[in-house]
Amino acid sequence: MSYRPIKSRLDRGGRVILDGPTGTELERRGVPMNEMAWCGLASLSHGEILEQVHADYIAAGAAVVTVNTYASSRLMLGAAGMEHEVARVVGAATAAAFRARDRAAHGRPVAVAGSLSHMVPPRTHEAPAPSEAEMLAAFRELAAALAASDCELILLEMMYDPKRMPLAITAALETGLPVWLGLSARLGDAARLLSHTEARPIPFAEIVALLPDAGIDVAGVMHTSATATDPPCMRSGRRFRDR
């Protein structure tokens, strides 16, 4: 299993290079995005380009590649009329990542991480916000599909919403797979460090406090400006790296 040597490296104080953005890179390479599901359906329509994105990250030194499932929950796919295609979308996305590893890793340990976000479609009059029960069911379905597709860990991407974040954590931990968690922050007025959400100013420390005491192998910061990740800004009263 490719995850073990990577986790061992972290436990010894070493560094592990993650890949870069997946959906954004697909978009940059000209893959059309769905108006409602963003990059979720690209795994079905542009698998060869997706595979190449993963392969390029591996060639650049990434030891973890992130499956293109950030926007592939039932909630996101349902907004595009594809709510019954979660398993097929996840299967196509993970297959592209494994193909890329097979041809680009050259024996170097590279782990395939299933992406699970708490992204939900924009709220409209026709589509009200999903309930907590609906979100938990969707996150559980996606997490189970990632596990069934042989992902070696779950990467909780861009966690910032205090209501949705515990639901995503629950779904990921239930798989029994190793879990990594990426928190996202922004700077507010007077350089206050806040959760990424702009719905209301939530102190970043409030999001950090939602991390469980056990079960998360690694927690850190992602999808956050370099200014906000300056060490003085990240003082939250709680250490959250390599938990």
Image: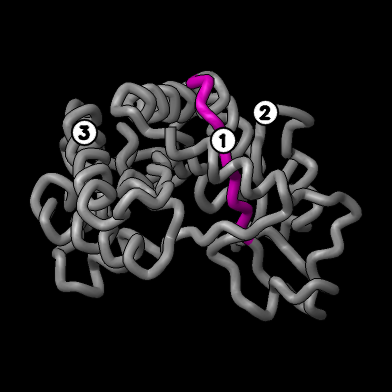
The label number, if any, that marks residue 215 in the structure image: 2
- Residue 148 vertical placement versus 241 (above, below): above
Q: Residue at x 65, y 63 (%)?
A: 185
The label number, if any, that marks residue 221 in the structure image: none
- Residue 27 vertical placement versus 7 (above, below): below
Count how many numbered circles sit on residues in the image: 3
Residue that badge 3 annotates: 91
Q: Is residue 215 left or right of residue 41?
A: right
Category of crowding for the residue at label 1, using alpha-carbon neighbours closer than 10 angstroms: few (below 14), some (14–19), many (at least 20): many
Q: Residue at x 19, y 55 (%)?
A: 51
Q: Is residue 183 magenta?
A: yes
Q: Is residue 243 left or right of residue 51?
A: right
Category of crowding for the residue at label 3, using alpha-carbon neighbours closer than 10 angstroms: few (below 14), some (14–19), many (at least 20): many
Image quadrant containing the N terminus: top left
Residue that badge 1 annotates: 179
Is residue 183 visible in the rendered image? The answer is yes
Q: Amino acid at mark 2?
A: Gly
Point out the stretch of residues depicted in magenta: 175-184
x, y (%) of residue 16? 56, 57
In which image quadrant can residue 25 be found? bottom left
- From this viewpoint, which residue is outermost toward the front? 107
